[in-house]
Image (spheres, rainbow, N blue to C red):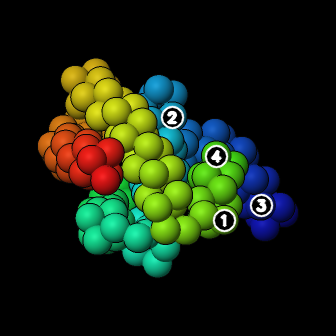
Amino acid sequence: MIIKSMTAGLIALALVSAPAFAQQAKSSLTSSDKKFVTEAAEGGQMEVDLGELAQQKAASDAVREFGRRMADDHGKANRELAQLAASKQVQLSDKPSRKAQREKDRLAKLSGAAFDREYVKLMVSDHETDVAAFRRESQAAKDPELKAWAGKTLPTLEDHLRMIRQVQGQLAKK
């Protein structure tokens, strides 16, 4: 009888505690902050993957060097973001987004000057979008740690945009 009462009590406690535990396991980020984290992680991984591809396929030393910089800088930012996401209970995908895979497949078919031209065009467009998104998040994020990370990462992205525009100008002169 005592065991039955204890079992019933434990079951009742588990049923009462389960919603509270489930609530703790949920992400502490707002939906817009969580969306930013997910998109930033996907975009960052795309930058690493395409940067590695650029190191292999580019004709221009400037494009290869930019690719190396992308792999290094975005790899570091990705590791920081993964730690932040884990602390906020946000699960990041370990697979490339459809867009990233499509771009990688498209660029993988190119080489030399054709690769350089398309990679640079994509990097300019992508970094313009990223700079705007990170600027917005660094000002409007609800989570203070995410806001700080976006603000800390923004100058690097702005630097990447300046660099790739310079590379674009060099390629246009050739």
Amino acid type of the residue that numbered disc 3 sits on in the rendered structure: Thr
Amino acid type of the residue that numbered disc 1 sits on in the rendered structure: Lys
Instruction: Choose between 56 and 101: the one closer to the eye.
Output: 56
User: Residues under labels 1 and 4: Cα distance?
Assistant: 16 Å
Question: Callout 3: few (<14), some (14-19), or many (20+) C-alpha neighbours within 10 Å?
Answer: few
Can see residue 162? yes
Q: Which residue position holds label 2?
A: 35
Q: Helix, strand or loop at disc 4?
A: helix
User: Residues under labels 2 and 1: Cα distance?
Assistant: 31 Å
Whether tag 1 and tag 4 are in contact, CB under 8 A, the answer is no
Camera-near label (1 vs 4) is: 1
User: Residues under labels 4 and 3: Cα distance?
Assistant: 52 Å
Q: Which residue position holds label 3?
A: 7
Camera-near label (2 vs 1) is: 1
* Mark sitting earlier along the chain (2/1): 2
Instruction: Choose between 24 and 7: the one closer to the eye.
Output: 24
**Residue 110 place in picture, x, y as percent:** 60, 64
Residue drawn at x 29%, y 34% is 131
Q: Which residue position holds label 4?
A: 99
Whether tag 1 and tag 3 are in contact, CB under 8 A, the answer is no
Which corner quadrant holds the N terminus? bottom right
Residue drawn at x 41%, y 70% is 59
Q: Which residue position holds label 1?
A: 109
User: Residues under labels 2 and 4: Cα distance?
Assistant: 16 Å
Amino acid type of the residue that numbered disc 4 sits on in the rendered structure: Lys
**Residue 50 place in picture, x, y as percent:** 48, 62
* Mark sitting earlier along the chain (4/3): 3
Q: Is residue 75 above or below residue 46?
A: below
**Residue 143 place in picture, x, y as percent:** 30, 33
Residue drawn at x 34%, y 33% is 128
Camera-near label (3 vs 2) is: 2
